[in-house]
């Protein structure tokens, strides 16, 4: 069932891209996508600020769809801003279509459907039936991914029926293929019938991308119905055709599908997925690198090649970091876009209200000077509102250019605010402690003061964590530190916290001096011991061990707690991870500690990892280089 969903989703993305390219008349679809992008970007230098310029921006946005969703979103926003300034309705609608595509790829289905619906209404008002059919197909794609098969099938059928009424039969290829995609319950004979029609039209126009897509549809249907071996020769044919046609994305899809058919053959799966990953990296399809690497890692682990496993894990870490940066940029872009769009909507709504008032007052007050003066005043205000809207559109472009600088400023501001909050929160916690020691207070007062104290401690912990976010090697000030004394200080400091749960913290270490940042490494060890206390039951034993190796120092924190389940192991070190859990005594967790600890350790040139068996405790390891003092 999972394989079926993945295959159908991939094919919908392919058909969606080709449909957009075809309906927007983006040139010869057999050309490589990267070549088209370069040509369109170069041509921007020779077009003035005009309708043609807006069309080019929207065109580039669609071409970036599968390669770089952030660029797709950026060019869509640029096209939207320019079209709004030019009052070019077709350009605004096309830009909404581009932006909706980017939102869909980022998983913002509700927001994508909102824009698709807006585009659908506009295209219908223009009488643009081809784009109406396209948008209906796109909306069917979104509802398919939302598991609303009934709505998806209804929209796909509407697009199919409308497309059959259009002049010219080349678009029928896409309609036949999308109809098969959106109706997976169709019998195989019916699917073969429509695929044959689609292939005949593609052959007529020598449309090689459509030929590749029609060749891949049937084996995907077979794989979804557990007929992998029967599908392999057909996949090979589709793969060869995709290579000869220069359709890199289709080639990647075919390689991935071929690997999925080779169950229980990790070496063979690795071969095809590695080819797919290499092609994705070479051709710039970064959006799919992480998905391919995850399958590669899973099958590499089955082969037992430790060096290769480590290599793939590093590739995944790099891909995750890149994806995280792209996501942050996208969130910033989308936040700005949403704010400006909301503000423009309010301004436009206000402008419409003012214009309505003007027409009403003009009809009622045409015979009096006073009312005419009031109408003139309202007219002046309407002009001002139009100017404000125009200025906001200019600000949109300036805002987009300043997004990267804004992100850096926000990070710096976060640290400043967190630092300034630490003193008042600490004072609040101290005052609550002092008031708790006062005698004669009611139970209700004690409850409220205890809640205030707990909230203050939790807030102070969060603020301290925020101050350590984005620790980098160049920011570290190192000094010679006796690791034994540092560990002893951590254990003594947390002894009373462990005592509250009747736990014992044991230290076994020797004196060794290394070059580190004392405060930050203390923070790492304190966080690991605090976690051990938090997730261990009452009366448990917690051990802190120090082992000196040839070139490294290894610190271990062992507990007898609840352990870490398999479904959390890949997320435990993520920033604001959803893997955070409540301690055995109800202690809160913010999901920052382990992520920041990893940043600090890696900034020192070290590594941090863990070993755990659910229900039998966990052991966290920290290795630091033993540099010369």
Image (tube, rainbow, N blue to C red):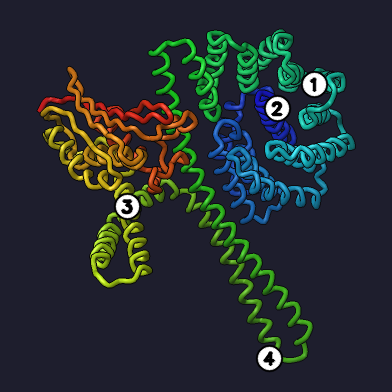
* Residue 233 occupies quadrant: top right
Q: Quadrant of the C terminus?
A: top left
* Residue displayed at 79% across by 82% down: 363
Q: Nearer the viewer, residue 409 or 511?
A: 511
Marks 3 and 2: in contact by CB < 8 Å? Answer: no
Marks 1 and 3: in contact by CB < 8 Å? Answer: no
* Residue 5 occupies quadrant: top right
Disc 2 designates what residue? Answer: 8
* Residue displayed at 59% across by 49% down: 49
Instruction: Decide: few, some or many residues near mark 1? Use Cα within 10 Å; few <14, some 14-19, many ≥20.
Output: many
Q: Earlier in the sequence, mark 2 or mark 3?
A: 2
Q: Tell me the distance, in whole angstroms, between the alpha carbons under discs 3 and 1.
A: 61 Å
* Residue 424 occupies quadrant: bottom left
Residue 590 lies left or right of residue 245; in this view the side is left
Disc 1 designates what residue? Answer: 202
Q: Tell me the distance, in whole angstroms, between the alpha carbons under discs 2 and 3.
A: 45 Å
Residue 26 lies left or right of residue 611; in this view the side is right
Q: Please, what secondary structure does the residue beneath circle 2 have? A: helix
Q: Nearer the viewer, residue 390 or 301?
A: 301
Q: Quadrant of the N terminus?
A: top right
Give the percent coordinates (x, y) of residue 433.
Answer: 25, 62
Q: Earlier in the sequence, mark 4 or mark 2?
A: 2
């Amino acid at each position: 069932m999972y394989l079926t969903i993945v295959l159908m989703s991939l094919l919908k993305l392919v058909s969606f891209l080709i449909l957009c390219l075809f309906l927007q008349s983006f040139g010869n679809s057999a050309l490589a996508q990267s070549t088209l992008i370069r040509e369109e970007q170069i041509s921007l230098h020779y077009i003035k600020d005009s309708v043609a310029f807006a069309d080019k921006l929207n065109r580039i946005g669609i071409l970036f769809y599968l390669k770089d969703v952030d660029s797709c979103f950026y060019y869509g926003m640029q096209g939207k801003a320019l079209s709004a300034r030019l009052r070019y309705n077709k350009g605004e609608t096309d830009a909404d279509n581009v932006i909706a595509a980017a939102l869909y790829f980022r998983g913002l289905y509700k927001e994508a459907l909102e824009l698709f619906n807006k585009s659908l209404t506009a295209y219908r008002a223009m009488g643009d039936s081809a784009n109406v059919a396209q948008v209906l197909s796109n909306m069917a794609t979104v509802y398919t991914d939302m598991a609303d098969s009934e709505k998806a099938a209804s929209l796909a059928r509407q697009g199919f029926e409308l497309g059959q009424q259009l002049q010219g039969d080349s678009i029928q290829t896409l309609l036949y293929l999308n109809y098969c995609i959106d109706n997976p319950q169709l019998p195989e004979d019916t699917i073969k019938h429509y695929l044959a029609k689609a292939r005949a039209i593609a052959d007529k126009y020598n449309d090689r991308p459509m030929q590749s897509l029609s060749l891949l549809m049937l084996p995907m249907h077979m794989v979804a119905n557990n007929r992998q071996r029967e599908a392999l020769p057909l996949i090979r044919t589709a793969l060869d055709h995709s290579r000869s046609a220069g359709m890199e994305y289709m080639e990647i899809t075919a390689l991935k599908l071929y690997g999925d058919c080779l169950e229980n053959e990790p070496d063979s799966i690795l071969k095809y997925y590695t080819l797919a990953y290499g092609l994705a990296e070479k051709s710039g399809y970064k959006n799919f690198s992480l998905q391919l690497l995850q399958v590669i890692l899973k099958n590499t682990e089955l082969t037992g090649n430790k060096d290769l496993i480590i290599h793939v894990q590093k590739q995944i870490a790099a891909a995750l970091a890149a994806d995280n940066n792209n996501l942050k940029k996208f969130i910033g872009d989308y936040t700005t876009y949403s704010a400006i769009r909301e503000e423009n909507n309010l301004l436009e709504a206000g402008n419409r209200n003012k214009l309505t008032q003007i027409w009403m007052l003009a009809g009622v007050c045409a015979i009096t000077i006073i009312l005419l003066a009031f109408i003139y005043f309202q007219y002046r205000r309407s002009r001002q509102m139009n100017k404000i809207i125009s200025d906001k559109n200019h600000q949109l472009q300036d805002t987009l250019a300043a997004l990267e600088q804004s992100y850096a400023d926000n990070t710096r501001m976060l640290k400043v605010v967190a630092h300034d909050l630490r003193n008042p929160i600490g004072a609040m916690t101290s005052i609550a402690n002092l008031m708790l020691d006062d005698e004669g207070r009611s139970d209700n007062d004690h409850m409220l003061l205890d809640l205030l104290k707990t909230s203050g401690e939790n807030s102070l912990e969060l603020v301290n964590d925020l101050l350590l976010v984005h620790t980098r090697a160049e920011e570290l000030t190192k000094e010679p530190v006796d690791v034994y004394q540092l560990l002893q200080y951590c254990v003594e400091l947390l002894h009373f916290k462990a005592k509250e749960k009747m736990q014992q913290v044991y230290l076994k270490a020797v004196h060794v001096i290394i070059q580190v940042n004392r405060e930050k490494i203390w923070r790492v060890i304190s966080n690991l011991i605090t976690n051990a206390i938090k997730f261990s039951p009452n009366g448990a034993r917690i051990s802190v061990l120090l082992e000196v190796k040839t070139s490294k120092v290894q610190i271990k924190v062992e507990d007898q707690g609840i352990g870490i389940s398999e479904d959390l192991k890949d997320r435990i070190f993520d920033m604001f991870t959803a893997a955070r859990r409540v301690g055995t005594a109800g202690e809160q967790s913010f999901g920052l500690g382990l992520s920041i600890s990893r940043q600090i350790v890696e900034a020192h040139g070290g590594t941090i990892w863990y070993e755990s068996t659910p229900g039998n405790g966990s052991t966290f390891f920290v290795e630091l280089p033993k540099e010369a003092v």
